[in-house]
Amino acid sequence: MLLHDVIMTSYCCQRYAECLVTTLFQQHSALAHRAAHGKTVSNNVDMADEFNQFFTSVYTKEDIAYFPTPKGVFQGSVTDRLNDVLIDQYLIKRNLLKLRTDKAGGPDNLSPWFLRKVDDEIATLILLLMRESLDEGTVPMDWKTANISPIYKKGDRSSVSNYRPISLTSQICKVIEAVLRNALVAHLEHNQLIHDSQHGFRKGRSCLNNLLTFLDKVTEYMITGNSVDVIYLDFAKAFDTVPHQRLLEKLKAHGIGGKLWNWIKSWLSWRLQRVCIKGKASDWTKVVSGVLQGSVLGPVLFLINDLEEGIENWILKFADDTKIFSKTQNTEDCERLQKDLNQLL
């Protein structure tokens, strides 16, 4: 297929996708019109602004003058630390071909369908870009901007607080994130730096595995005649409030440094976002905390936590959804569970 034909076909597919999205929005006429402070808006630009103001209002304002030093959990040698990532054209092309063609492009308007069609022509170029970016420890600004799509969660559809922000970012950057994510996961799993309690975003650690582990333990307790107390936790805005400086320090504590650490620091820093609704966009605003929902690297960075530090009873996590539980034979068992809850909060 000629490059001109690929570009024209990509353009037609993009126009079709835009029409489809517009139709879906028209079918959901209850899209949030009420801002967090109760004001009602109907203009698409005003709606986008209200969404963006709400999404940015939850960010963590981190005090970088002082924060606790994380416990060093990495026990390997200096040479075992993950400081750089070996990349080649095969890795780039393999991840290019994994791009989902039903997903939208980012602010650069490069669709995944188009990138997959020209994978042979651009794989080497992306390899050179990635190598240069890693060596310099800098991420181009085009890769740090995101179009935000508000996705309904639950509750009143007319309230902005009932939507989550999903970031649509550069597809080229996602290819690079995929390469780095695989290296990070291999390092964390090989050095046993992710707790067994953590499910979600891990191979062999699905929601089903989480539930089966829980069912097995509860059944064991009940067969022996014990009661079981369970506390379910859902941390509000967990992905959006991750403080960047603390995250970067925890990366060091997990044996991640050098060029890779510098790249991740740049990837997190000076990010910009805007909310897009029916072709209309809000103003750009700074992203000062969080790991992007909709990115490739974000979920892995979210797994780097010490949530269960000091917990005595069972704890199981699926992404940010957490439950702690124990058998309760007496008051002491209940008090230990309450102590764990206090530790988490």
Image: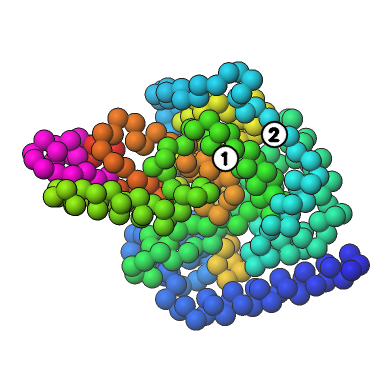
By what rule are the colours in the image chosen? rainbow
Image vertical order of residue 158 relative to residue 260, above or below: below
Q: Nearer the viewer, residue 140 or 95?
A: 95
Q: Position of residue 59 (x, y in %)?
A: 43, 44
From this viewpoint, which residue is outermost toward the front? 224
> With 290 as the anchor, is 162 left or right in this view?
left
Indicate the secondary structure of the residue bearing disc 1.
helix
Indicate the secondary structure of the residue bearing disc 2.
loop
Q: Which residues are magenta?
A: 324-339
Quadrant the C terminus occupies: top left
Kindly identify the residue that appears in the image at 64 percent across and 20 percent down: 79
Residue at the spot of label 1: 185
Q: Position of residue 192 (x, y in %)?
A: 49, 33
Residue at the spot of label 2: 85
Quadrant the N terminus occupies: bottom right
Does residue 333 belong to the magenta stretch?
Answer: yes
Does residue 311 belong to the magenta stretch?
Answer: no
Question: Which quadrant of the view contains residue 39?
Answer: bottom left
Q: Are marks 2 and 1 in contact (CB under 8 Å)?
A: no
Question: Which quadrant of the view contains residue 133?
Answer: top right
Kindly identify the residue that appears in the image at 52 percent across and 52 percent down: 293
Image vertical order of residue 17 relative to residue 104, above or below: below
Image vertical order of residue 292 relative to residue 244, above or below: below
Q: Position of residue 334 (x, y in %)?
A: 13, 41
